[in-house]
Image (cartoon, grey):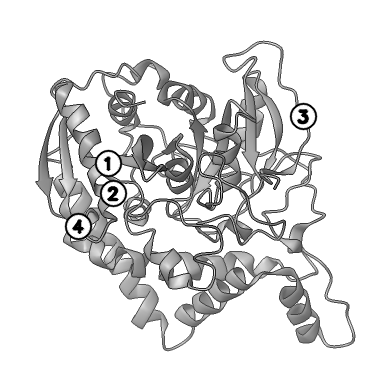
C-alpha cells in the first residue's frame, strides 16, 4: 500500500543561499503555507488555503530550504497514531504494518522514508517525540516559547510547540537554529536567558561529549513499560555510561496524575479553539435552513471525525458551569505540581532520561477502538509539556524488530545540553 505520507505534495522554493540550502523539508499540515492547502488532517478544512505563511515557514524559506509538501497527521493533532486523519492512515516506513505514531506521523515518516531531509511537526503532548520514537528518527520538542506558534492552527495553546525531525541530532539542531527565536507576532515567544553558550548554535552543541553528564532516571516513567522497551532503554543508558556519563534514580510522584491533568487541559483548550470551525467563519457550510443552531451542528457533525468530537465534548464538559473547579482547576493545580517536581529533580541532574514511549509501535488499527489505551501511551511525554520543558527523542535500538526511542528532558531552554547528550547516541 501507499505510505500516505503527504496530504499535499507541492514544492515551495526558498532563497538561493542560506544555512538550509539544498535541504528538503516536509511540513506538518497544521502549519500555514501561503497559497498551499492546509487541512489539519480534517474534512472540515479540506479546501482551506491560507493567505499567509507561518513564521517557521518564512524562516525556512529565508534559510534556503525547499519545502516538498504538507504531511499527513491525526485530525487537528488529536491522536497518537496518525489514523484519525480524514485522508487515511500513514504507514510506518521503519515498521511496515505498524503506526508511525502521532500526531505528526506524516512528518516522521517522511524523514524515515527519505522523502525529506528534515521535517517540522508540532508537539502538544508528545506529538513529535512519539512518532520520532516509532519511526526510528530524531525529534526535538523545544521549550515552550522558543519557537513561534504564529501560523500554527491551535489545538492546545498553552502546551504546543513546533519542532524538527531528522535522521541525526545535528541536522535536527541545525533546523532548530533556523526556526527558533522571538517573534513579534507571537507574544508567548521568549529570549533564552543569557549564558555562556548563548552565542553558539544548537548544531554546534552536537558534539557527543557526555563526559561528566549527570542523568536522572525517573522510576515512575519505567513502571508498566514493555519489557523489551525497558531492556533497550537500559542498553542505551549503558552506552552513555561507557562514554563518561553517570545516572541515578529520581522520583516524580506527580506524573501519576499527569495524563489526567493533560487531557483535561488539552481538551478544554481544544473545545475553545475549535469553536471557530462552525461552517461560517471556517469549515464546510452546514447549509443554512433557517435555524443557525442546526446549521452549526450539521457543519461540525460532518466536518469533524470521531476523536475530535470526543475531545470537544469532554473539554466543553470540563469547562461547563459547576464542573470548572472540579476538573479544569484541579488539572491546573496538578500541572503546577508536575512543574515543581521536574524543577526539583533537575537541580540534581543535568538531564532526565526515560523511554520515549512505554510500548513499541502499535499494529495499525490496534488502538482505534480503545481511546484510553491511546491516551495512556502518552504517559512519558505529556508531563514535559505540562512543565513547559524541552525534550528530545533519539533512536535507542529495537525490540522484536520495532524501533524504541530514548527521551531526554532538560531544564527550560536547556536544548544545547539535550542536543549534546542525544548526539552521543545518534
Tag 2, which secondary structure? Answer: helix
Find out whether the residues at labels 2 and 1 contact each other: C-beta distance under 8 Å: yes
Q: Which residue is mark 4?
A: 220
Q: Give me the C-alpha separation between circle 4 and circle 2.
A: 17 Å
Which one is in front, 377 or 411?
Answer: 377
- Percent position (x, y) of residue 224? 24, 61
- Of tags 3 and 2, the one toward the viewer is 2
Which one is in front, 157 or 314?
Answer: 314
Tag 1, which secondary structure? Answer: helix
- Percent position (x, y) of residue 206? 35, 19
Q: Give me the C-alpha separation between circle 1 and circle 3.
A: 39 Å
- Percent position (x, y) of residue 111? 56, 33
Which one is in front, 36 or 321?
Answer: 36
- Of tags 1 and 3, the one toward the viewer is 1
Q: Give me the C-alpha separation between circle 3 and circle 2.
A: 41 Å
Q: Which residue is mark 2?
A: 228
Query: Which of the two discs, 4 and 2, labels the residue nearer the N terminus?
Result: 4
- Quarter location, residue 252: bottom left
Amino acid at each position: 500500500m501507499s505510505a500516505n505520507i503527504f496530504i499535499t505534495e507541492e514544492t515551495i522554493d526558498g532563497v538561493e543561499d542560506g544555512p538550509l540550502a539544498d535541504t528538503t523539508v516536509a511540513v506538518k499540515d497544521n502549519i500555514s503555507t501561503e497559497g498551499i492547502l492546509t487541512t489539519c488532517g480534517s474534512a472540515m478544512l479540506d479546501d482551506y488555503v491560507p493567505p499567509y505563511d507561518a513564521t517557521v515557514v518564512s524562516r525556512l524559506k529565508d534559510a534556503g530550504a525547499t519545502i516538498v509538501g504538507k504531511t499527513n497527521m491525526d485530525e487537528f493533532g488529536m491522536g497518537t497514531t496518525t489514523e484519525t486523519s480524514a485522508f487515511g492512515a500513514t504507514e510506518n516506513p521503519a515498521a511496515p504494518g505498524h503506526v508511525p505514531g502521532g500526531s505528526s506521523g506524516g512528518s516522521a515518516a517522511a524523514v524515515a522514508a527519505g522523502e525529506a531531509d528534515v521535517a517540522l511537526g508540532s508537539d502538544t503532548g508528545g506529538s513529535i517525540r512519539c512518532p520520532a520514537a516509532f519511526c526510528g528518527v530524531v525529534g526535538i520538542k523545544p521549550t515552550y516559547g522558543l519557537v513561534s506558534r504564529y501560523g500554527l492552527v491551535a489545538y492546545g495553546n498553552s502546551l504546543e510547540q513546533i519542532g524538527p525531525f531528522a535522521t541525526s541530532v545535528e541536522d535536527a539542531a541545525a533546523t532548530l537554529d533556523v526556526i527558533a527565536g522571538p517573534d513579534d507576532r507571537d507574544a508567548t515567544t521568549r529570549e533564552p536567558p543569557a549564558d555562556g553558550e548563548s552565542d553558539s548554535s544548537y548544531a554546534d552543541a552536537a558534539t557527543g561529549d557526555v563526559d561528566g553528564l549527570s542523568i536522572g532516571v525517573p522510576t515512575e516513567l519505567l513502571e508498566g513499560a514493555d519489557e523489551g522497551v525497558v531492556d533497550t532503554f537500559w542498553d542505551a543508558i549503558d552506552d552513555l555510561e561507557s562514554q563518561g556519563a553517570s545516572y541515578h534514580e529520581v522520583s516524580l510522584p506527580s506524573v501519576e496524575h499527569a495524563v489526567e491533568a493533560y487531557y483535561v487541559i488539552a481538551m478544554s483548550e481544544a473545545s475553545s479553539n475549535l469553536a471557530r470551525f462552525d461552517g461560517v467563519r471556517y469549515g464546510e457550510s452546514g447549509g443554512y435552513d433557517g435555524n443557525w443552531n442546526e446549521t452549526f451542528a450539521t457543519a461540525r457533525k460532518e466536518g469533524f471525525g470521531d476523536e475530535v468530537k470526543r475531545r470537544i465534548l469532554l473539554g466543553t464538559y470540563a469547562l461547563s458551569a459547576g464542573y470548572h473547579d472540579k476538573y479544569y482547576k484541579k488539572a491546573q493545580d496538578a500541572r503546577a505540581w508536575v512543574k515543581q517536581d521536574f524543577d526539583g529533580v533537575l537541580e540534581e541532574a543535568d538531564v532526565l532520561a526515560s523511554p520515549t514511549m512505554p510500548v513499541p509501535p502499535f499494529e495499525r488499527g490496534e488502538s482505534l477502538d480503545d481511546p484510553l489505551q491511546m491516551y495512556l501511551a502518552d504517559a512519558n511525554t505529556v508531563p514535559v509539556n505540562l512543565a513547559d520543558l524541552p525534550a528530545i527523542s533519539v533512536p535507542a535500538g529495537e525490540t522484536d524488530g520495532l524501533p524504541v526511542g530514548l527521551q531526554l528532558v532538560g531544564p527550560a531552554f536547556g536544548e544545547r545540553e539535550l542536543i549534546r547528550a542525544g548526539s552521543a547516541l545518534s
